[in-house]
Amino acid sequence: MAPHKPGLESIMAETSEATKLEDSHGFSEYSGSVKLKGKNALVTGGDSGIGRSVALLVAREGADVTIAYLLSKQPHAEATKKFVEQEKRTCLLIECDLRDRHACRHAVDEDVKKYGAVNILVNNASKQYLSTQFEDVDPDKAENIFRKNIIQMIAMAKFALLHMTQGSWIMLLLWLFGLSNTLDPKGIRVNAVAPGAIYTPIQVDTRDANQMEGWGHKAGLGRPGEPSEVATSFVFLASAEASLYYGQVMHCYPRGD
């Protein structure tokens, strides 16, 4: 049986880096500095890929974590929870399909029950289908993607805002500037991260072996990026170090991608 979209970590030929960054010695573990101590982060799609890396790095920075994930990805969510707990932080798992707005409300409500408020919302969950010709686009799939990638972000932000105060942070690409202008006076920062060719399960799931051969190697780095190399942008934007960042898009992809 083909894996459910979005992709599963177990089908990747090589393991992606969730907590290591490239340096002169290769890849070394990210070292946290408790810049998010006392915070909690609700990460949609935090079971694998970029979402998992964000969950682990914010935990390493002192934040507790909630992960919203699909039932089909239960084993990966459980694995991420164990990794977060190894950082001595709490990890709440919420199985839900965020295409259902009631599930979005449920995810936020459970997070608030656990932690009392939403400090950081990372709208990471998404899905994709590839089509080389526009005339081959399936409208039903397009509608499904719109519900998963767009509507759920609106719903998650709407419900989370009821429990956010000054100093909170939202990662939201849709209507970024409008929402940022609305929430700036309340001290709630809204920013976005735009990743390029990053080696994650969703890429492997939507491409065959031939398409993955050499994928991302035309970028300036000569390789695709790793989830950990994107997650650091989320950590920065969620921290006090980004206090002047409102309505910004951080582009995380190598030159030439």
Image: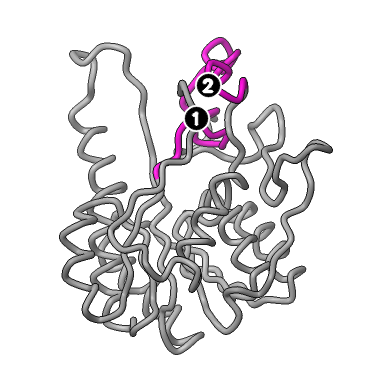
Q: Which residue is mark 2?
A: 219
Q: Quadrant of residue 126?
A: top left
Examine the rendered structure and indicate whether residue 28 appears above or below residue 56: above
Q: Closer to us: mark 1 or mark 2?
A: 2
Query: Of the numbered discs in the image, which one, if any, rests on residue 197?
Result: 1
Residue at 45% over, 62% down: 237
Inter-mark Cα distance, 1 to 2: 8 Å
The span shown in magenta is 194-222
Residue 113 place in picture, x, y as percent? 45, 87
Residue at 44% over, 66% down: 242
In the orientation shown, which residue stands out farthest toward the front?
244
- Looking at this view, is 110 or 242 the one in front? 242
| First of labels 1, 2 by sequence position | 1
Callout 1 touching callout 2 (CB < 8 Å): yes
- Looking at this view, is 186 or 123 the one in front? 186
Residue 75 place in picture, x, y as percent? 64, 53
Examine the rendered structure and indicate whether residue 183 appears above or below residue 134: below
Amino acid on which the number 1 mark rests in the picture: Ala
Residue 208 place in picture, x, y as percent? 53, 17
